[in-house]
Image (cartoon, grey):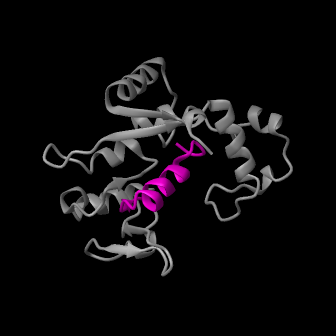
Amino acid sequence: IPKAGGTSLKRLLTSCLNLLDASNRGSFHDKNETLFVVRRGPASGQRTVNVNLATKAGIQRARQLGLAESGLADVVASPLFLEASSLFTPENKGVAFAVFRHPVERAASLFHYLQHAEWEPTYNPELKNMPIEEFAKSNLSEDDSVVRSLVGMLDGGEVSTEDLKVAKDIVRRKVIVGLTSDMET
């Protein structure tokens, strides 16, 4: 979930707990035909698997190369919950966890980030001088992104009450939930 503490959590898991992750951090090496561990800089002890789990194509590649079966990653992180769940099998299970942030705080944080994040694919120069109130009323703000991610509707379409019920059921039954408001800074 964008701007909900995921980067901080990944940093904690990889730097403090020394876990090896598979996320989007190995994307510079994601054209190889085999999986391997990439060191994240000579001074850093951080390591990652050479995959990009931020895209559907990257998840498909990781699945074809047998990421879960390889046992290389201690942690798998992806904004594409439904697609990433396809990496796992009954023999190679995963545990889902997510960090949630109050939706208004998350939307405001995302807005302020995207005003300056020229390196982001979703960067929009229109946001640079736009007041947040205008952003909130525009079609540039997100629309039910958490529900969309959980039920596989990231490409659009109208989110229904039934979609919301399914998303809530997925979280209730399958996800260990953390709240950014409970995270220490």
Q: Quadrant of the C terminus?
A: top right
Q: Quadrant of residue 105?
A: top right
Is 160 within the magenta?
no
Residue 33 drawn above or below residue 87: below
In the rendered image, residue 125, in percent from the top left (x then y), is placed at: 77, 57
Q: Quadrant of residue 116?
A: bottom right
Is 9 within the magenta?
yes
Residue 16 drawn above or below residue 38: above
Residue 184 drawn above or below residue 120: above
In-front residue for pair 185/24: 185
| Residue at image coords 69%, 43% | 109
User: Total marks drawn?
Assistant: 0
100 left or right, relative to 77? right
Which range is magenta? 1-23
| Residue at image coords 47%, 62% | 15
93 left or right, relative to 100? left
